[in-house]
Structures are given as C-alpha cells and as structure tokens.
Image (spheres, helix red, strand yellow):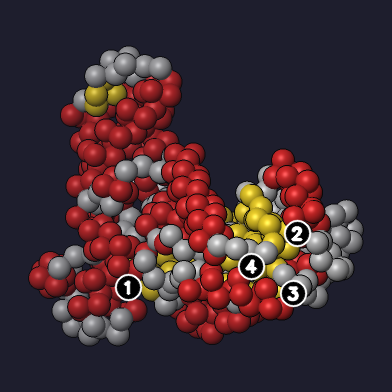
C-alpha cells in the first residue's frame, strides 16, 4: 500500500534525499521548505502521512503537528530530528505522533519500513471505519438493495462506475433508495477508506446552504463565532452525496459548477482556495432536463453532474422483489421491537403486491414497521393501513388501471427523453428491448418515435 506523503524539511539537500527515497518506493510526495508552507499544503490537500523536521524556522514540526489534531481525519506524523532533541520527539509521540528518526539518516530502509508500516496501519484503520460506517448507516445487503429484475441493469452499472472517478447522477422517485445506491457506489470504490458525507439540499435553508457545503470563517456572518468546515472539507478523500440537487438555488449552482470544474472552493468569508478532493454523487426526483428547459437549473451544471446517469425504478415496477423486501423488514423490525412473528399471511402479501406504492420502499418500510407493532403471530391483512387494503379489496380494478397508466407514462417519458431510441429507453427502464416492444404494442405507443 502506497501513500500520499507531505515532506517538510528546511534543509534542501536532505529534503531532496528523503524525497528520492520515498518516491523510488512508489509513494507520491509533495514537499515544503518550512512549517508555514507545510501548513498551507495541509489545508489544501489530504495526506496519509507527514514526514517533518522537528526544528525549523517560522513554524516547528511540533507546532505543525498540533495544528492538525483538530482536523476530522488528521494525517499521521513521523518526525526527523537531531540527536540532541530526542526528548521533544518522544514527547510528540505521547501526543499521538507515530515515531521519530534521528539525523543523519544512516539507513534508508529504516525510514521506508517506518513509513510503510504507518500507511498500512492507517489503511486497516480506514477499512474498519468504512465497515463501521456501513453498519451505522444500516446498509442492507447488496442483493436486497438491487432485488427485483428491474434493478439488475442498475446493479451492473453501479459496479461499472464505482471504480472510476466519474460524477454520478441518480434519478428516482422519493423513497426508491437513491442514498443506499450512492453509499454502495462509495463502498465499492477506492475512496471507501474515507468518508461518505450526505447533504439534502432541500432540507437546509437557502441562507445556510452555502456554509453547509463550503464551511465558513470566523466572523463571516452574525453568529459565526468560530471557523467551521463544510461538507466538502469533511468528505476530503471520499464521497459527497448531494440529495435533491434540483432544489439547489441558482447562486449556489454557479459555485458548485466551479467546484466541479476547478476542484477548488473558498469558505464563506474566506479568500484562500481549498482543494475539493471528493467524488460527487447527486440525486434528484425531478426531471432535470425539464428544469434546464425552464431555466430553473443551469445547463452547464447539468452536463457536469450527468456524466453517468442512473435511473432507479419505482417499487411498483419491482413487485417481484416485494417478498424479499417484506421478509427483510419483518425480521429487522421484529428484532428491534423484540417480537417473534411467524411471517406474513398470504392475503396481506397479496394486498401489498396490488398496491401501487407511491412512497416506494420508504413507504413499504413504514407499513412493515406498523404491521410488526400490531401483529400477534402473523402480519395479517387487518394489520395493514386502509389504503393498502382498499387497493386489493373494494377497488381492485382502480389499482390495476393506475399501475398500467403509470407504466405507460414511464415508457412514453423514457422514449421522449431519448428521442425515440428504444434501446436507450429500454436500458433506462431496466427491461429488455423485446419487453419494451411488447409494452409499446400493448399501450398503443408504436407510433411514438
């Protein structure tokens, strides 16, 4: 495992010597001639490790170390010092530094062994944190996230794009699992050792959204009593997920465009540029092409975000996944509540299969939690909400007609979006071209070119 290393050393000859040793071993190395320049680089980029002289003019290596301790993901530190300052280096280790070496550096292998051990230990730590992050977020198994035939195309696309750095734009109705898919992309990517930072653009007041995204400096506005990092800084080296991107106000759209183009931004009230070392995944339940046409969304930002679009089908188009999802939520909520239920009676499952699920998987989750609370042995039809029961009882024809109407509109919309290209429309809908041809005939859409 090779690392991104910052080397801070005021002796130019020794700095060049150490840089050569590290780069010959495959590490990526940036250098600074003093502590002030080193601090500037630390504020610009994310490093796995800092190798620094302990004693330097202006700002010492120890001061540099202490200034990074409050960062969300501070880098590891190895000090190089003259023999007479070993006590200071030992003191720094008590504060969290990895180790130290003394000048002159007699054996380069000693430095490499120390550096490689530190970077490997950090890698293991980050992998552990990623696993804990997945557990904490309640991420279900991948086979559940992509359950149903309509999700198989999406699953393949997710695996194709995860290992790249491409921006991803996830389309889907509310409750279809857009954040789960975004988290899956992150965990399958090389960035999974760093954080996944979500932000719902519709949930933050417009006057606070810029600060949430980019942070602010002390005194930037009334109440800004201290500097604060934004989501782009917190996601350093990882992934930022911008949900409901269609709700972002136009002034911030322009600032986000700059981040995507130049990979830099400034905090609110600040002037220094900070590098945005993040992958951007955005999501929307809006038709962004229509938003662009109505001049509510910037066309240039749309094309920057829409590098790799993913369309998530609604639950009504994934009814074959319903038994698996129902079983998952049954066991999950039974464990949480402390009940031992036998299952779901067939009549209840039939009712759920007929219901069109306007709230998608989020609505199913709520229905199942309610059912587990009310059930005594099995989740029965009587434990379901009235609207779910009615869709299978008093108004069966209406439920079927609604499903067909929605299906027809989805197909027509996909065809319009792709200029009548049936192959692209079928891919977006997650069905085969033969199935699409059958549906076009069924819904009398064969003239829809």
Give the structural element (helix, strand or loop) at label 1. helix
Q: CA distance from mark 4 to mark 3?
A: 15 Å
Question: Is residue 228 visible to us here?
Answer: no
Mark 2 residue crowding within 10 angstroms, few (<14) / some (14–19) / many (20+): some
From the image, tell me which residue sits under label 1. Answer: 413
Rendered view: 42 above or below 68: below
Disc 4: CA contacts within 10 A as few (<14), some (14-19) or many (>=20): many
Residue 21 horizontal/vertical position (percent):
54, 71
Q: Earlier in the sequence, mark 4 or mark 3?
A: 4
Horizontal arrangement in the rendering, residue 71 relative to residue 429 (left or right) = right
Q: Position of residue 93 (x, y in %)?
A: 70, 45
Residue 11, label in figure: 3
Nearest the viewer among 154 and 351 is 154
- Disc 3 to disc 2, C-alpha distance: 12 Å
CB-based contact (under 8 Å), mark 3 and mark 2: no
User: Nearer the viewer's eye, disc 4 or disc 3?
Assistant: 3
State the SS at label 3.
Answer: loop
């Amino acid at each position: 495992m090779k690392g991104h290393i910052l080397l801070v050393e005021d002796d130019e000859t020794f700095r060049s010597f150490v840089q050569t040793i590290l780069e010959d071993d495959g590490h990526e190395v940036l250098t600074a001639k003093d502590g002030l320049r080193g601090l500037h680089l630390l504020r610009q980029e994310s490093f796995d490790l800092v190798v620094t002289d302990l004693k330097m003019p202006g700002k010492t290596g120890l001061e540099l170390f202490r200034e990074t301790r409050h960062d969300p993901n501070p880098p590891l530190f190895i000090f190089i010092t003259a023999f007479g300052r070993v006590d200071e280096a030992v003191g720094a280790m008590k504060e969290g530094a990895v180790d130290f070496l003394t000048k002159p550096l007699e054996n380069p292998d000693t430095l490499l062994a120390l550096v490689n051990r530190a970077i490997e230990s950090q890698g293991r730590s980050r992998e552990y944190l990623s696993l804990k992050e997945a557990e904490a977020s309640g991420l279900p198994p991948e086979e559940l996230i992509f359950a149903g035939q309509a999700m198989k195309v999406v699953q393949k696309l997710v695996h194709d794009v995860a290992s790249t750095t491409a921006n991803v734009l996830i389309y889907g109705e509310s409750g279809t699992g857009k954040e789960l898919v975004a988290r899956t992309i992150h965990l399958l990517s090389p960035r999974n050792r760093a954080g996944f930072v979500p932000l719902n653009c519709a949930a933050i007041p417009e006057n606070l959204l810029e600060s949430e995204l980019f942070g602010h400096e002390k005194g930037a506005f009334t109440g800004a009593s201290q500097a604060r990092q934004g989501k782009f800084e917190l996601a350093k080296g990882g992934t930022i997920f911008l949900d409901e991107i269609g709700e972002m106000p136009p002034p911030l759209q322009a600032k986000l465009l700059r981040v995507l183009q130049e990979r830099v931004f400034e905090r609110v009230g600040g002037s220094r540029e900070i590098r945005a070392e993040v992958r951007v995944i955005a999501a929307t339940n809006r038709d962004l092409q229509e938003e662009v046409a109505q001049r509510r969304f910037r066309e240039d930002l749309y094309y920057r975000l829409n590098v790799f679009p993913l369309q998530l089908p609604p639950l009504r188009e994934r009814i074959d996944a319903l038994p698996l999802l129902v079983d998952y939520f049954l066991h999950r909520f039974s464990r949480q509540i402390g009940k031992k239920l036998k299952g779901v009676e067939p009549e209840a499952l039939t009712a759920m299969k007929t219901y069109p699920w306007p709230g998608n998987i989020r609505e199913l989750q709520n229905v199942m939690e309610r059912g587990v609370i009310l059930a005594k042995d099995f989740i029965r039809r009587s434990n379901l909400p009235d609207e779910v029961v009615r869709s299978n009882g008093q108004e069966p024809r209406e439920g079927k007609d609604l499903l067909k109407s929605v299906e027809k509109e989805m197909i027509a919309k996909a065809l319009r979006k792709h200029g009548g290209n049936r192959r692209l429309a079928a891919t977006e809908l997650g069905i085969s071209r033969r199935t699409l041809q059958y549906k076009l005939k069924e819904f009398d859409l064969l003239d829809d070119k």
